[in-house]
Image (cartoon, rainbow, N blue to C red):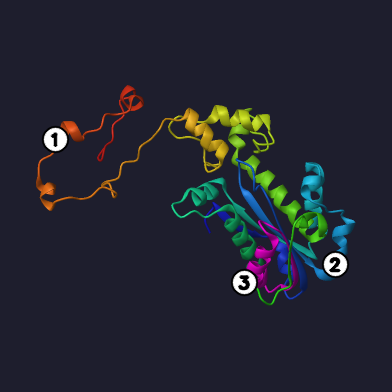
């Protein structure tokens, strides 16, 4: 599987084969301009759901980073006999390519497909799925119909604020958030080690560190590194202001009539057809070449 959209299952999920389980699905990192979006499925033996309440799991956004990490470690160790999880990690590069493609793959569809894949992998691991709780993306009713059509034999509940209503979704939320935070630090390790703070990745909150990083890191030709979501309006606006414009020339203008076939054999006036280079490339003596 490609590194820009990888699927990971915890080893503890193996202990749940053949057992009746309840699933919860949530994400972290849907909105930021930096780093991946992570979808998580929490898988808990249904008769042991009470353990999650004892751990006081709740929506990850309501917990400190220290508390989130502590609960995550306990879920992965002390409660691994009854709890497992799966992760779908979608890189910033994957999201940018999907949303900037000629046929766009929007964020809602990406999210829905990630949830579907996580349910499928639980079923393929021979987990007996009793019920699935999903934090909604878009209208809950249409999302529920989509999932029920795909999995007609499963009891699926799609709800707003599911991460606050159902402990199993809260657990998934914690798994997703802790994983995203760790992945973000790993992606930007060299930059962070150099003493540069990239912040949380949310420029609209706003996070001053993220805003400053974006403003100072944009390259006039290459834009941002691959851990920035080029498709986000924040990144697009900075590229518009600080990067040079580029015209991608087609071999042939598709919209232009081809005309009489004899024109293909007529000589061309090179002085008229050759476009002048941009000043940026002239100053740096950069030319387009086909051979080195």
Secondary structure, mark 3, is helix
Residue at 64% x, 45% y: name it.
31
Q: Earlier in the sequence, mark 1 or mark 3?
A: 3
What x and y, as percent, mark residue 123?
A: 66, 72
Relative vertical location of residue 129 with respect to residue 228 in this rendering, above or below: below
Q: Nearer the viewer, residue 250 or 48?
A: 250
Q: Which residue is mark 2?
A: 48
Q: Which residues are magenta?
A: 121-148
Residue 190: quarter of image: top right
Task: Answer with left or right where residue 75 lies relative to residue 241.
Answer: right
Q: Which residue is mark 3?
A: 150
CA separation in Å, label 3 and label 2: 27 Å
Task: Answer with left or right where residue 182 lies relative to residue 220.
Answer: right
Label 2 with label 1: CB-CB less than 8 Å? no
Residue at 34% x, 40% y: name it.
248
Q: Is residue 137 magenta?
A: yes
Which label was assigned to residue 269?
Answer: 1
What x and y, as percent, mark residue 22?
A: 77, 68
Which label was assigned to residue 34?
Answer: none
Q: Nearer the viewer, residue 193 or 101?
A: 101
Relative vertical location of residue 72 with respect to residue 117 in this rendering, above or below: above
Residue 186: quarter of image: top right
CA separation in Å, label 2 and label 1: 80 Å
Q: Earlier in the sequence, mark 3 or mark 2?
A: 2
């Amino acid at each position: 599987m490609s590194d820009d959209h990888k699927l990971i299952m915890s080893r503890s999920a193996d202990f749940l084969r053949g057992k009746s389980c309840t699933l919860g699905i949530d994400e972290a990192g849907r909105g930021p301009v930096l780093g991946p979006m992570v979808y998580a499925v929490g898988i808990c033996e249904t008769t042991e759901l009470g353990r999650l309440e004892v751990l006081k799991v709740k929506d990850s956004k309501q917990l400190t980073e220290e508390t989130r990490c502590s609960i995550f470690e306990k879920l992965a160790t002390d409660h691994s006999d009854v709890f497992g999880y799966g992760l779908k990690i979608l890189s910033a590069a994957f999201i940018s390519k999907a949303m900037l493609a000629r046929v766009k793959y929007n964020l809602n569809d990406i999210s829905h497909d990630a949830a579907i894949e996580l349910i499928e992998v639980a079923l393929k691991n021979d987990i007996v799925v009793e019920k699935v709780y999903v934090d909604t993306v878009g209208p809950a009713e249409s999302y529920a119909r989509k999932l029920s059509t795909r999995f007609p034999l499963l009891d699926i509940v799609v709800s707003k604020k599911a991460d606050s209503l159902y402990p199993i979704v809260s657990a998934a939320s914690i798994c997703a958030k802790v994983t995203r935070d760790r992945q973000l630090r790993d992606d930007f390790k060299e930059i962070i080690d150099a003493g540069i703070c990239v912040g949380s990745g949310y420029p609209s909150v706003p996070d001053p560190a993220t805003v400053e990083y974006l403003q100072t890191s944009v390259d006039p030709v290459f834009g941002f590194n691959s851990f920035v979501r080029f498709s986000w309006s924040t990144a697009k606006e900075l590229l518009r202001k600080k990067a040079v414009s580029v015209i991608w020339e087609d071999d042939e203008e598709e919209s232009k009539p081809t005309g009489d076939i004899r024109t293909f054999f007529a000589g061309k006036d090179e002085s008229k057809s050759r476009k002048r280079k941009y000043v940026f490339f002239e100053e740096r003596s950069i030319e387009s070449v086909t051979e080195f």
